Amino acid sequence: MVGIDLLKEKCNANSLDKISGLSREVIDFIVKYVELCNPDSIFIRDDSKEDAEYIKNKSLELKEEGSLKISGHSVHFDGLHDQARDKENTKFLITPDFKLEGLNSIDRDKGIGEIELLLKDIMKGKEMYVLFMGLGPVGSEFSVYAVQLTDSAYVAHSEDILYRGAYRVFEDNTDVDFFKYLHSAGELDENQASKNIDRRRIYVDFSKDTVYSVNTQYAGNTVGLKKLALRLAIRKADREGWLAEHMFVMAVHGEDGEKNYFTGAYPSSCGKTSTCMVEGESIVGDDIAYLKKRGGAIYAVNVERGIFGIIRDVNEDDAPLIWEALNKEGEAIFSNILVNDKIPYWDGDGRITPTEGNNFSGSWCSGKIDEFGSEIPFSHANARYTIRIESLNNADSEKENPEGVLVKGIIYGGRDSNTWVPVFESFNWAHGVVSIAASLESETTAATLGKTGERKFNLMANLDFLSIPIGKYIKNHLDFVKDIGDSPAMFGVNYFLRNEHGEYISGMHDKRVWLKWMELRVNKKVGAISTPIGNIPKHKDLEKLFKELLNKDFSLDDYNMFFSIRCSQNLEKIERVSNIYHGFKEIPAEVFSILNEQESRIREAQNKFGDLIAPDKFI
Ligand code: SPV
Ligand code: MN
C-alpha cells in the first residue's frame, strides 16, 4: 500500500480529516516515514486541548510517564545511560564538496543508509504522533515552523509543554517552509526506557532541513524543536542575516519600573536558568532566542514557551520561584529524579532523602551500584523539570509579543574557577564578541555525556550546536550591528570564581546584584573602572546594591577579592583561545587583533602593578 492509502489505513477518521488540509510536502514527509517505520497507527495532532490531553494520557497509559501526588504532575525516566545529550553520536550528514571544519560529521549517503536501517519497521506495534509546532510566537516575523514525528508520547508531551502548537499555520498555508524531525525511542526495556542505546544516533541533514533521532529518549537528543532545531536554525539565520542563539531572554527592572531586556548565553549548568529566574526580575525564556534587527535596533523572542530546567539545587531558599511552580497543581514532568510514595525527590531539594524508591535505574535503594560498580545516585545530576513559563509568577508580560523585546544588553557566562571577575563590560561590541563571547570557556558539567570538571572552549555557549564554519559564525556576530545605531552593551559574568582554598566566593543570590549593575550600565546611570579586560564596577555602586538587594555589607576586601585582575590567568586564557583559532581557517582578522591588543594591555599592567591587580590601580 502506498501514499495516502497507507495513511487512510493507519489514521482514524479524525486524524484523516486533519491531514486533508495539509500540503503535498507535509503529506509526502509523513508518508515517507510511515512507510519506513511502519507504525500500527498514526495520530495527527492539531492545536486543540483534547489532542494535547490525548497525548498526555497515552504517556501515562504506556507508562512512559507515571503520575505523581500533585494533580498534573508526572515522572519520566530515561535509561540509566541515556541521561544527557550524546555529542559523539550527533553528526551532520555532509556531501564530499561540503566542508564543516571541526564539527562532527559523516558522509551523507553513509549516514542515511545507517539511519534507514535502524528505522526500518522500528514503530511496529506503536503509534506515531505527528505534531505541528512553532519556534517563536506563532505568526510572528521571527517564527520558524516544524513538523515532528515521534513514537514517544513522552517526547510529544514534552514538546507540547515546551513549544507553541502551529497546526493552524500548516492548515492555512500550503507553502509554509518547515523543519522536519523524525524520532523513535526504539525498542523499550521493562522500565519503558530505550534499550539499544549502543545504536543511539542523532543525524542532522541540512540538505533537507531534517533531523533523525533514534534509540534515545533524553529530551536534549529527542525533542526536535530544542537543540536539534537550533542546529538547523543557525544555518537558516546565517542565510537570512539574523542570529539563533543559546540564550535566555529576561527583563531587569529599573528603579523607575522600566523593563530592560537582556539576553544571556551560558553553557549548560552554568547558571543560565537561575539568572533569568532571580527574584525581582521577569523571564521571557531560559534557553534559546532568535535575534533580529528592526529600525536600527535588535529584538529577541523566546523560541520556546516552556522550560526544561535542571532540578538539582531547586529548593525553597535558593530557587523560590521554581520551587513554587513545582509544588502547585498543573502540568509538570519531573525526569530522572527519585520517586517515593508518588513524591519526587532530587539533589539539593532541602528535604530528607528517602533511602529507597524508583529512579532512572528502576527500583532503587541507597548503595545500589551499576554494572561497572559505580554507585547510582538517587537523582541524576542532569535530572530535569519540564513546565510552561506561564506557570511561573515571574513570567514577563511581553513573552508572547510577536514583535519581540528590545535587547539592551547581552551577557555571556561560563564556569570558571580562576580567571574572569564576576561581572564586567566590554569596551564595545567587537571587543565583547571577541574577548567575551568568542573566548567563552567552561568547566564541563553533567549536561552532556563524559567527564566533568574539564575546562572547555565554548564560543557563545553555542559550540555544541554550531552548524556553520566557526569563522563565519563569529563574522556574523561582528557584522550584526553594522547598521545599528546604539548596539547593545555586552557583559561577561562568572559565578564560579574560587579562592585559594578552592571554595566558591560568590553567594547564590549575588547575581541579582550583577544584573542590577548591568541595568545601571545600559542606562548610563553609573560609571565604571576601565581595566585591561574591560569595564568593571566601582566599589561604591556594588556596596549600595548589595545593601539594598541582599542586605549584605560588601566590604572593600570583598570587592578586591572579587574584582582584582588576575593577569597570568587572563594571559593563559588568551593563549588557549588564540591557539584554538589559529587551528581554523577563515577566522576574521579582528579576532586576532583584539586578542593581541588585550594581551598587550594586560602585560603592560602586569609589568607596572604585578600579577594580581586591585581595581583601584586603574583609577
Ligand atoms: C542544555 O543542556 O543546554 C539544555 C538541556 O538546555 S538540553 O535539552 O539537553 O540541551
Ligand atoms: Mn540549553
Image (spheres, rainbow, N blue to C red):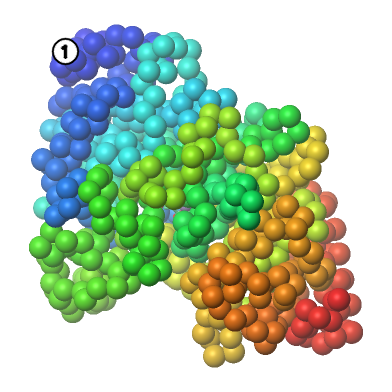
Q: Is residue 22 left or right of residue 535?
A: left
User: Visible in this render: residue 401?
Assistant: yes
Amino acid carrying mark 1 in the image: Ala
The quarter of the displayed image where residue 165 is located: top left
Q: Quadrant of residue 578?
A: bottom right
Residue at position x 13%, y 59% in the image:
342
- Residue at 87 percent across and 71 percent down: it is 600
Q: Can I make out residue 603 in this image?
A: no
Q: In this rendering, would 526 be left or right of 72?
A: right
395 vs 293: above or below: below
Disc 1 packing (10 Å; few <14; some 14–19; many ≥20): few
Looking at this view, name the residue that lies furthest to the bottom.
Answer: 501
Residue located at (78% from left, 66% from top) = 528
Determine whether, in the image, residue 420 is placed left or right of residue 602: left
The x and y percentages for residue 384 are 33, 57
Which quadrant: the C terminus? bottom right
Residue at 63%, 69% in the rendered image: 545
What percent of the width, then of the height, locates residue 330? 24, 45
The image shows residue 387, relative to residue 40, as above or below, that is below
- In front here: 278 or 420? 278
- Left or right: residue 70 versus residue 527 is left
Residue receiving disc 1: 13
Q: Is mark 1 within 8 Å of ligand 1?
A: no
Q: Camera-side residue: 354 or 400?
A: 400
Between 290 and 599, the one nearer to me in the picture: 290
Callout 1 secondary element: helix
**Where residue 49 appears, x then y in whole percent?**
25, 28
